[in-house]
Image (spheres, grey):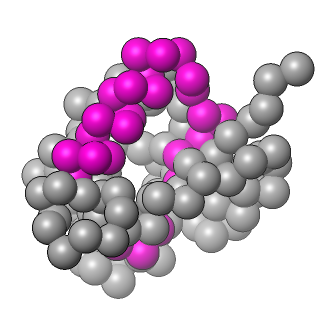
Protein backbone atom coordinates (compact mmCIF):
# COMPACT_ATOMS: atom_id res chain seq x y z
CA UNK A 1 0.00 0.00 0.00
CA UNK A 2 1.45 3.37 -0.98
CA UNK A 3 1.34 6.38 1.29
CA UNK A 4 -0.52 9.51 0.32
CA UNK A 5 1.74 12.54 0.53
CA UNK A 6 0.75 16.19 0.40
CA UNK A 7 3.40 18.83 -0.25
CA UNK A 8 2.89 22.33 1.15
CA UNK A 9 4.66 25.42 -0.15
CA UNK A 10 4.48 28.17 2.47
CA UNK A 11 7.25 30.29 0.97
CA UNK A 12 8.21 31.54 -2.45
CA UNK A 13 10.53 28.62 -3.17
CA UNK A 14 12.33 26.03 -1.08
CA UNK A 15 14.33 26.70 2.05
CA UNK A 16 15.00 29.86 4.01
CA UNK A 17 17.90 31.38 2.10
CA UNK A 18 17.75 35.11 1.44
CA UNK A 19 18.64 34.27 -2.18
CA UNK A 20 15.27 34.15 -3.97
CA UNK A 21 16.78 32.66 -7.13
CA UNK A 22 18.27 29.77 -5.13
CA UNK A 23 14.94 29.01 -3.41
CA UNK A 24 13.17 28.99 -6.79
CA UNK A 25 15.86 26.83 -8.42
CA UNK A 26 15.66 24.27 -5.60
CA UNK A 27 11.86 24.10 -5.84
CA UNK A 28 12.03 23.79 -9.62
CA UNK A 29 14.49 20.88 -9.43
CA UNK A 30 12.51 19.20 -6.66
CA UNK A 31 9.25 19.31 -8.63
CA UNK A 32 10.90 18.15 -11.86
CA UNK A 33 12.58 15.21 -10.11
CA UNK A 34 9.44 13.97 -8.38
CA UNK A 35 7.55 14.16 -11.67
CA UNK A 36 10.33 12.29 -13.53
CA UNK A 37 10.51 9.62 -10.83
CA UNK A 38 6.76 9.12 -10.82
CA UNK A 39 6.62 9.94 -7.09
CA UNK A 40 3.44 11.93 -7.41
CA UNK A 41 1.95 13.52 -4.30
CA UNK A 42 -1.76 13.34 -3.56
CA UNK A 43 -1.84 17.16 -3.75
CA UNK A 44 0.35 20.25 -3.52
CA UNK A 45 -0.97 23.13 -1.44
CA UNK A 46 0.14 26.76 -1.61
CA UNK A 47 -0.45 29.41 1.02
CA UNK A 48 1.15 32.57 2.41
CA UNK A 49 4.08 33.51 0.11
CA UNK A 50 3.85 30.09 -1.54
CA UNK A 51 0.96 31.34 -3.69
CA UNK A 52 3.48 33.36 -5.70
CA UNK A 53 4.78 30.10 -7.21
CA UNK A 54 1.57 29.54 -9.20
CA UNK A 55 1.32 33.08 -10.54
CA UNK A 56 2.51 34.82 -13.71
CA UNK A 57 6.28 35.13 -13.80
CA UNK A 58 6.97 32.10 -11.62
CA UNK A 59 9.86 29.98 -12.95
CA UNK A 60 8.04 26.86 -11.69
CA UNK A 61 5.00 27.04 -13.97
CA UNK A 62 6.20 24.37 -16.44
CA UNK A 63 6.91 21.88 -13.65
CA UNK A 64 3.62 22.63 -11.93
CA UNK A 65 1.68 22.24 -15.19
CA UNK A 66 3.38 18.88 -15.78
CA UNK A 67 2.36 17.67 -12.31
CA UNK A 68 -1.17 18.93 -12.83
CA UNK A 69 -1.30 17.09 -16.17
CA UNK A 70 -0.40 13.91 -14.27
CA UNK A 71 -3.45 14.43 -12.07
CA UNK A 72 -1.87 16.17 -9.07
CA UNK A 73 -4.27 18.79 -7.67
CA UNK A 74 -2.60 22.14 -6.98
CA UNK A 75 -4.65 23.83 -4.25
CA UNK A 76 -4.12 27.58 -3.81
CA UNK A 77 -5.30 29.68 -0.87
CA UNK A 78 -7.76 32.32 -2.08
CA UNK A 79 -7.32 34.41 1.08
CA UNK A 80 -3.58 34.64 0.43
CA UNK A 81 -4.07 35.52 -3.25
CA UNK A 82 -6.50 38.27 -2.28
CA UNK A 83 -4.15 39.57 0.41
CA UNK A 84 -1.27 39.90 -2.07
CA UNK A 85 -3.51 41.15 -4.91
CA UNK A 86 -2.62 38.13 -7.05
CA UNK A 87 -6.05 36.64 -7.82
CA UNK A 88 -5.80 37.60 -11.51
CA UNK A 89 -2.21 36.38 -11.81
CA UNK A 90 -2.86 32.66 -11.16
CA UNK A 91 -1.63 30.56 -14.09
CA UNK A 92 -1.99 27.00 -12.77
CA UNK A 93 -3.96 25.16 -10.10
CA UNK A 94 -7.29 25.39 -8.33
CA UNK A 95 -8.09 28.42 -6.22
CA UNK A 96 -9.72 27.19 -3.05
CA UNK A 97 -10.22 28.07 0.53
CA UNK A 98 -8.57 27.00 3.73
CA UNK A 99 -11.19 24.24 3.94
CA UNK A 100 -9.78 22.69 0.75
CA UNK A 101 -6.26 22.84 2.17
CA UNK A 102 -7.38 21.34 5.48
CA UNK A 103 -9.14 18.52 3.63
CA UNK A 104 -6.00 17.71 1.64
CA UNK A 105 -3.83 17.75 4.76
CA UNK A 106 -6.27 15.68 6.80
CA UNK A 107 -6.46 12.96 4.12
CA UNK A 108 -2.67 12.67 3.79
CA UNK A 109 -0.57 10.03 5.49
CA UNK A 110 2.39 12.41 5.32
CA UNK A 111 2.66 16.18 4.90
CA UNK A 112 5.92 17.69 3.61
CA UNK A 113 6.31 21.40 4.37
CA UNK A 114 8.64 23.30 2.07
Which residue appears farthest toward the front when viewing the image?
17
Query: Residue shown at 12%/57% (left/top)?
Result: 21
Q: Is residue 54 left or right of residue 93?
A: left
Query: Residue shown at 80%/24% (left/top)?
Result: 2
Q: Nearer the viewer, residue 89 or 21?
A: 21
Q: Was residue 42 drawn as part of the magenta stretch in this picture?
A: yes
Q: Nearer the viewer, residue 86 or 110?
A: 110
Up the image or down, 24 lies above or below 42; here it is: below
Where is residue 68, by image quadrant? top left
Look at the magenta stretch and give its main secondary structure: helix
Q: Nearer the viewer, residue 15 or 95?
A: 15
Q: Position of residue 50 (x, y in %)?
A: 37, 64
Q: Is residue 112 left or right of residue 110?
A: left
| Residue 3 seen in the figure | yes
Where is residue 17, by image quadrant? bottom left
Q: Position of residue 11 (x, y in %)?
A: 37, 68
Q: Was residue 19 drawn as part of the magenta stretch in this picture?
A: no
Residue stretch rendered in magenta on the structure: 24-49
Query: Residue shown at 64%/60% (left/top)?
Result: 101
Up the image or down, 105 lies above or below 10; here it is: above
Query: Residue shown at 88%/20% (left/top)?
Result: 1
Q: Position of residue 6 (x, y in %)?
A: 64, 46
Where is residue 48, by image quadrant? bottom left
Amino acid sequence: MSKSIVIVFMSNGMGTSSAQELRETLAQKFLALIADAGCLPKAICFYTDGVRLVCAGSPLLAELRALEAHGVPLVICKTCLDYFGLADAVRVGIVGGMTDIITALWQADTVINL
